[in-house]
Image (cartoon, grey):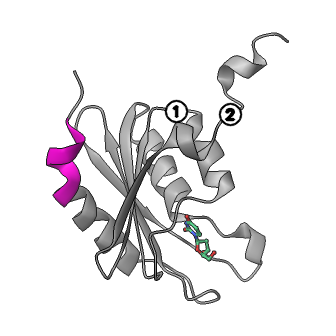
Amino acid sequence: MSVALDSSLPALREGAAQAMQKAYAPYSRFRVGAALLTEGGAIVTGCNVENASYPAGICAERAALGSAVAAGHRRFVAVMIVSEAAEPTPPCGMCRQALVEFGSSLQVVSRTTGGSEARWSLAELLPRPFTPSSLQSR
Ligand code: THU
């Protein structure tokens, strides 16, 4: 039995909002924070980290995922995203692919600093994904 998303939402919102404050986004000036909720109830955060060589930058969601995996987590319930956009933004395609590696039942919640919130399942955002099982017929 994994942790309930609803009871973790306030802590996820806070974690993602605090991570957004740490974002390094001098080029886009689009700061993003992400907070992953693990099945065990831990919260691991990340922010976008841009680079003078633009493609070397990393999104908040993948930064959070890297930190979580490095801390030993591989089973996730949800990711909370916070940005200063006018509307809640879904994760980019590369982040959807990175997240689906660990399961498509992930809940994706996105929030603006103004308080608007949207929620999708990763399966809805990335139908017909390429997953570890896609490699099994090699
Ligand atoms: N970005 C994220 O961190 N997450 C998203 O879901 C979308 C985009 C970052 C990448 C870049 O640093 C900035 O936002 C503008 O694209």
Instruction: Determine the secondary structure under disc 2.
Output: loop
Is 96 drawn above or below residue 35 in the view shown?
above
- In terms of sequence position, does the residue under pointer 2 or pointer 1 come before the other? 1
Badge 1 density bin: few <14, some 14–19, many ≥20, Cα 10 Å: many
Q: Which numbered disc covers residue 76?
A: none
Task: Choose top left, top right, bottom left or bottom right for residue 84.
Answer: bottom left
Counting from the top left corner in percent of width and height, residue 78 is at 37, 44
Mark 2 crowd level (few <14, some 14–19, many ≥20, 10 Å Cα): some
Which residue is located at x 75 percent, y 77 percent?
54
Is 24 above or below relative to 35?
below
Magenta stretch holds residue 99: no
Q: Residue 57 location, x and y as percent? A: 66, 70
Q: Which mark is residue 104?
A: 1
Task: State which region is magenta.
Answer: 4-10
Q: Toward which corner of the image does residue 73 lie, by quadrant?
A: top left
Badge 2 residue CB within 8 Å of ligand 1: no
- Residue in view at x 45 percent, y 54 percent: 64
- For image coordinates 37% across by 58% down, the residue present is 45
* Quadrant where the image shows the N terminus: top left
Q: Main secondary structure of the magenta part?
A: helix
Type of the residue with mark 2: Pro
Residues at marks 2 and 1 touching, judged by CB atoms closer than 8 Å? yes
The residue most toward the left is: 7
Does the magenta-highlighted stretch encompass residue 7? yes
Local secondary structure at mark 1: loop
Alpha carbon distance from label 2 to label 1: 8 Å
Q: Residue at x 61, y 52 (%)?
A: 95
> Which image quadrant shows ligand 1?
bottom right
Q: Position of residue 138 (x, y in %)?
A: 85, 12
Q: Is residue 80 above or below residue 19?
A: above
Q: Which residue is mark 2?
A: 129
